[in-house]
Image (cartoon, helix red, strand yellow):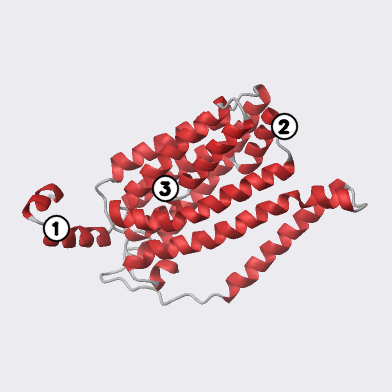
Amino acid sequence: MLSNAVLPERRTSIFASYSLIGSLLGAVGCLFASAPEILARITPVPPNRALQGMFLAYAFLGALAFVIYRQLKSPEEATASGPATGPLGPSRRIVFTLAALFSLDSFGGGFFVQSLLALWLFDHFGLSLTAAGSLFFWSGLLSALSYPVAVRLARRIGLVNTMVFTHLPSNVCLMLVPFAPTLGIAIALLLIRSTLSQMDVPARTSYVMAVVTPPERPAAASITSAPRSIAGAASPILAGYLLGLSSFGWPLVIGGGLNSLYDLLLLFMFRKVRPPEEHALADLRYRQSSPEQASILR
């Protein structure tokens, strides 16, 4: 819906705004992770009852989101310039390859979902629930502030390069966390990671919508999202098993390694598959460049 509602030049920017709003509100929500603990201290409500209340609040917000989505009006569906080719036509190979890569990334990310990360920090450093909520608040805030930066980077170096060259350093920071000697260093690494790790989110979504034809966009969004969700649901089981075997943060090392592999494969396989607007921008820079610059651009 968003891709069909804006010009190609603004697609990455609109996805960044979409992610920015969601991350800011998600960061605020992280602060409420300490609400049951605080409520149990200042009221006679038992801690378990307070936690159950949080689940009810979460369910209410989900129902509210459903109502809001129902009010949305879809923009006019883009019409194909040629004959209909089914849900996926000329972009079938690209979409399925991207779906496989995104599934690898999601599988790696499932090794350090917030709940498991909070559990490891509690076991390893004794981090409290309130402190974990504050950590995830600042992580979400830094991630949100990185989205506008991702838009500027994408305009200069392209969507694929933005995805890879921001995501790869964040994975290195993650893999270093289990080796941190103190809680302060571990938190610093996690915050640095948060500043970089989510820049690929608007770039990734924009890239998928850019490399397929408009009639293929709903199918491409579905095919690249559904396997990603399934893959991300499988790895926490393995991560929990590893945490039960050892107090060392093996899930962080393995998850960061898998995400790094995804980055390298994405760069190798798609560095030359560029969206139309990037080709247009490159042509414009070429025409405006000096002979020496033109030889470099070629």
Mark 2 crowdedness (10 Å alpha carbons): few <14, some 14-19, many ≥20:
few
Say whether residue 291 is left or right of residue 79: left
Residue 221 in percent (x, y) is at 44, 58
Helix, strand or loop at disc 2? loop
The part of the image, by quadrant, that contains residue 277 is bottom left
Q: Residue at 32% across / 47% down in the picture?
A: 161
As drawn, is 274 to the left or to the right of 287?
right
53 and 215: which is toward the camera = 53
Contact (CB < 8 A) between labels 3 and 2? no
Tell me: 122 left or right of 93.
Answer: right
Q: CA distance from mark 3 to mark 2?
A: 38 Å
Q: Are marks 1 and 3 in contact (CB under 8 Å)?
A: no
> Residue 71 location in percent, x, y?
58, 76
- Residue drawn at 12 percent across, 51 percent down: 293
Three-letter amino acid code of the residue under disc 1: Tyr
What residue is pinned by disc 1?
A: 286
Lower sequence index among marks 3 and 2: 3
Image location (x, y in percent) of residue 59: 72, 59
